[in-house]
Image: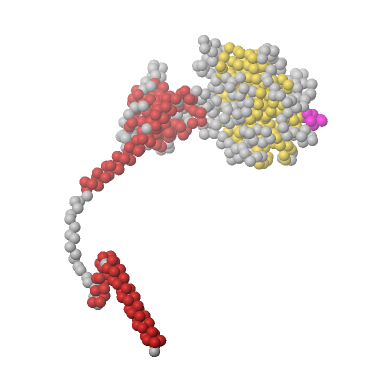
Amino acid sequence: MASDGGSSSLQLPCVFSPKPQQYLALCAQDGRLRIWNTDNKTLQQEYVPSAHLSATCTCIAWGPCRTVKDGPQRKKRKSEAVQVEERADLLAMGTAAGTVLIYSSVKGALHCTLDGGHTGGVNCVQWHPEDSLLYSGSDDTNITEWDLQSGKTRSVWKADRAAITSLCVSPDGKLLLSAGYVIKMWDLETKEIYRKFTGHSTAVTTLCFATTRPPDGNGLYFLSGAAHDRLLSVWQVRDDGKDKNSVVSFTLTDEPQHVDLVPSNSKEKAVRLAVVCKDGQLHLFEHFLNGPCKKPLSPTCSVQLSDTKDSPAPIPLLAAALGAEPRTVTLAYGNHLQPVMERVELNISERHICLTRDVHTSLSLSMETNISKVKTPLVNAKSKVLVPGFPGHKAPKGSSQTSEKRKKDNDTKEMSIAERLGEIDLAPVSLETGAPKNAPSLQTDNFAVLLVQGLESNDANILNKIFQTRKESVIRKTVARIQLSAVLPLVHEITTRLQGHPHSAKMMVMWLKSVLMHHTSYLASLPDLVSRLGVLYHMIENRVKLFHKLSKLHGKLHLLTTQMVTGTNSSPVTEVDCTAKLVYEEESSEDEVSGDEALPDEESDHWEEEDETMEEEDEDSDRRESKTNGEEMEHGNESEEE
């Protein structure tokens, strides 16, 4: 039986242990690893990584079952039969910091830490079925092969241009599937590409071999699923290389979140498949892989859970594992912090099955004391206990006295919040510096604790003192250190205060900015985020709607006020003296002066007089010519007569 070894970083990892599915390992929103026993429905172990807040767990994968020694054992006689029991032990966890943690469920402690193989966050881990090897894919586009005996890397190679989001090792341990957007098949001996498969437009989140490798070489199949894709594609690896397209497709209602598969060893045996989608439904498939199939295959049976209330609501399924019998399925549903495990027998003849269950919303974790042991450190009397926070800060003066009082009155009553506030000496906060008056500085740890207490008790006095700070560094560190369960109450309190006086709203915007900077990923994971933040969104939209008009009005008023100020401040204008202070005359001849004086005035006034004089001169010239001509004529006649 095989299950998806690599999980998408956007989903919370949740994987059943191999073979009898005795354990369920999952990482919740708080970054802790919890291992549940599916037989007695109890919390078996809980592990808190040292960097569970800064480097959250992104993917988990169970290792192959092995023989382990559970505690000291006595020497057995030769006559006693030696019974070797194999059980799931090691669990690999990839983190966002690029490290891989190996946890031992038998020892209940960290086995080893694999570091130095990646520069980006680990997205998927996959075990080798036989050797003590582990493969991991990361955002740095590399695949790392780890040797668990030495705890070091054996080889690292670049596998893709994009981030590696899924891995899978073949049952015989000779081939490795890796995928970002393109699926590649690698030969583990030579670390060379054997085949490439293209067809997904988004990042591939699921890879799993559907059959073992047969001798003929044409019967090797594997399936793949991608983000935001409602199909599971089955690919055939052929010797002739004609395997560019998928041969079979399984239709789903949403993108696959958890896949469990029983592989087929021959053509006569069908492949059994259980797929849990993102919408919380379970789809069961059973198909004989024998060449291509044109039409997408619908599930043989779909399972959905709902509660027993008057208006039933669906219960999301987290994971599912197929049992040895065809009808037996192990389900995990409910909340990641306290899931419900159940083995059910389904009537596969029905296409749609709806199971009603009564799931309690209150969390009550029950742990086995004989397996999970909580160790308390032994503190020496000479040791010095430091207050959590920044180094160099000292505890309040009344801390030693209050600790003695708590030891004496531990059996009588518990201290109230008012007494705690008095002991930690929470003074009024100055508006200029943001720090309490008459005190060195209030630590951000105390701020975070008080903020959570004020939100839980709805104490306006505590919240008013906390929200009076104006230092952005204190606000950022306080918001970063609060628990995830207090994020939504803080957002509701900020929304309520934003509707009040504009002065308080200005301070609340700084808190809202810090919440969105540090806890956006958690808010985005909430299914009812739109309904929860609807009031805040509409309030911001209504206030921003008038901003453009107000800015125009502000500009006009500023222009008018500046003109009025300049008008009042300007000095009165005096009359200008138009008399010339100095007169300069240029020397010139009398002819030029007379000519210049006559030109500009007489040209325009005596045009007609000039024309008349010109005509008279022409007439005189004509008369003279005519007289001379007459005299010549008379002299000619006289000569002729003579």
Q: Give the range drawn in magenta.
A: 210-219
Q: Where is residue 464 in the image (x, y as percent from the top left)?
A: 34, 27
| Residue 387 included in the magenta stretch of the image | no
* Residue 575 shown left or right of residue 273 in the figure: left
Residue in view at x 18 percent, y 54 percent: 574
Q: Where is residue 595 in the image (x, y as percent from the top left)?
A: 26, 73
Can the viewer see residue 604 in this picture? yes
- In the image, residue 453 sits, relative to residue 135, either above or below, namely above
The residue lying at 73 percent from left, 34 percent from top is 244
Q: Residue at x 70, y 22 (%)?
A: 297
Residue 214 falls within the magenta-colored stretch: yes
Total marks drawn? Answer: 0
- Looking at this view, name the residue that lies furthest to the bottom: 642
Q: Quadrant of residue 201?
A: top right
Residue pictured at 60% horizontal, 13% vertical: 355
Query: Do we see residue 35 in this rendering?
Result: no
Residue 592: image x %, image y %?
26, 75
Q: In which quarter of the image is residue 247?
A: top right
Q: Is 467 or 547 nearer to us in this picture? A: 547
**x, y percentage for residue 270?**
75, 21
